[in-house]
Amino acid sequence: MNVERETVTGSRTGAARTWRIASVASVALVAGLLSGPGSRAEEAPAPVVIAYACVLPPGASPEPSASDGTDSGAGADSGAATGSATGNAPGAGAAAGAEKLRITVEIATSLPSAATVGKPIQPGPVRVEARVPYAELAPRFPTGTTGLSGEATLGVQVRQNDDTAEATWSRLTAQTETPAAEEELRLGHSGEVPTITVGSPGDIELAAGGLTLTVTPTVDGAPADGSTATLTCEPSDPDQAAFARVAVPGDGSPSAPGSSASGATPGDGGAGRDGIDVAPDEDGPRGAETCPAEQPTGDLDLSQLPEPRPGTVLNPPFKLPGVPVCAYAVGLGSVRKLNGSMIINDPEREPALMNVRANMQSTTRSAGPFYVRFDSLGALDLPDSRSTFLGFGFTPVTAAVEFETTPITISTGTIDVFPNAEPFAVVTFFQSLRLHDVKVNGTPLDVGPNCRTSKPFRVTLRGDFTSTTGRYTNVLIGGLLTGAVDIPSFTGCGTKGEDVSPLFTASISGPGNLITMNQATVCSPGGVGTPGCPPAIPPLPGAKTP
């Protein structure tokens, strides 16, 4: 069921936006949704492997790799990419004649088998797995590197008939453990991407273009400042870079005016009536330029953590100074009884920024099976959420929800070692909901100033480390977090002696209300996590209600 904004008849098929961190809101309130028009991802074709040639920024060059007979470009990199990943030749920014590092890239995404003229096509979460000889990167990273995080930007050429347009799939993130020097580094980047709309029938073909990869080492769970390596790459054979195709049937006539943007001519990458419209991934409200000065305060709540393996003896938590970071988190919360969902921290309005004191304490084992954990504290003052649902299946009811949220504990870690390693991410806090500005079929319903849940309820979200797309990594890198909440009964609803609390309790309260939040790389004013600065606004997770 697709999520909508304040309307029962509209649909949300806009571009995937930019993204961020875990807070949430058991939000559940009134939230309703009907399926909207547009083509959603429904089929997952086999991944396609594409060969790429990459260069590294100028600097000290390590010895060429002899493992496959190819030369490698190299150089220390402490900053951002020097090439562009929005076109077919990002390597143009590299020094002429630079030696190339050969890598392979596996691309996979879900797409509908067929699409409709004038209706946006939303590719499913994509996976871009880069396979890089680790011996070429290892000399750039500090001693003690235990993990690697990556961010990828992929240029995608969209082709249909004689038209082409360029899409940019950006802020795709990945994280993995450090491989042995002689092994291959595999970074499985994933994330949400913009929609595509076409103005005429004809098969659509997607082809991979320029690729920028940023790889950051982590030491003791935190990014190593100043040791980021950036590769700018292009397909070794652009004619062999196609990875997906979608049929757009029709009678050959162009779409009606207004189905896509006007004013562009076919073939210029724009969106004429018969052209291709690639929704930008940077439109909508922009986020804050930097993190708030104040740091979150409060006590950590460690009651929801998974148990260590039997026989593990833990050391007392080791206090750390913590790293001041911030990020956005946006998501969806379902109301099971209403079979609907609502948007939390709406990315198309003025979303609130999550302030985090990251890695403020660490816990390890003193005996027994391996265990390591980092605990962080977050604070988020969510904006009110407004949503429309169908009361009793046919009456539109609109309401605003105010969220009262306690400090947020974010714990990430690993239990045991390979092949039995179990990474975990747990986000937990308490929350209360207050309903106001309620309208039934457009007529205001006065519920008073104190229509709220009868008590705070616990929200616990957990990261999914098994998914191939959008999986959670850690508090600095982010990903998708999900959980279910039990919404308490409502109290204080109504005025002039009329108590409508039982109506809201009957319609909303109960267990099994699902929440999904999207978190990404954080921004740190002190330099940690700089790929996430300034804080960017993430796209909503897939708008499906179980």
Image (cartoon, helix red, strand yellow):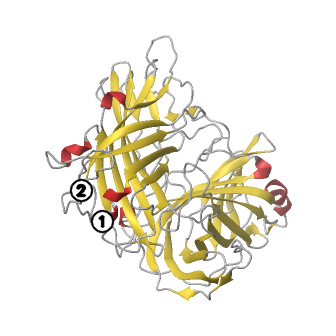
Judge from the rendering whether residue 417 lies leftward or rightward of residue 354; answer left or right: right
Query: Which residue carries the number 1 mark?
Result: 140
Q: Dividing the picture into quarters, in which one does residue 85 lie?
A: top left
Residue at 78% over, 63% down: 486
Residue 361's place in the image compared with 214, above or below, is below
Q: Nearer the viewer, residue 320 or 544?
A: 320
- Residue visible at 36% across and 66% down in the picture: 530
The total of numbered circles placed on residues is 2
Element carrying mark 2: loop
Crowd around label 2: few <14 · some 14–19 · many ≥20 (10 Å): many
Give the residue pinned by disc 2.
Answer: 74
The quadrant in which residue 403 appears is: bottom right
Residue displayed at 79% across by 71% down: 454
Image mark for residue 432: none
| Mark 2 vs 1, N-terminal side | 2
Q: Nearer the viewer, residue 327 or 449?
A: 327
Image position of 518 (left or right of 142): right
Amino acid identity at mark 1:
Arg
Residue 145: x percent and y percent? 41, 70
Residue 165 lies, in percent from the top left, at 34, 31
Tag 2: residue type? Ala
| Residue 262 in view (yes/no) | no
Q: Quadrant of residue 406?
A: bottom right
- The residue closer to the viewer here, 345 or 315, is 315
Q: Residue at x 42, y 55 (%)?
A: 185
Q: Could you tell me which quadrant the N terminus lies in?
A: top right
Q: Nearer the viewer, residue 413 or 272?
A: 413
Find residue 66 and report its horizontal and vertical position in percent: 29, 50
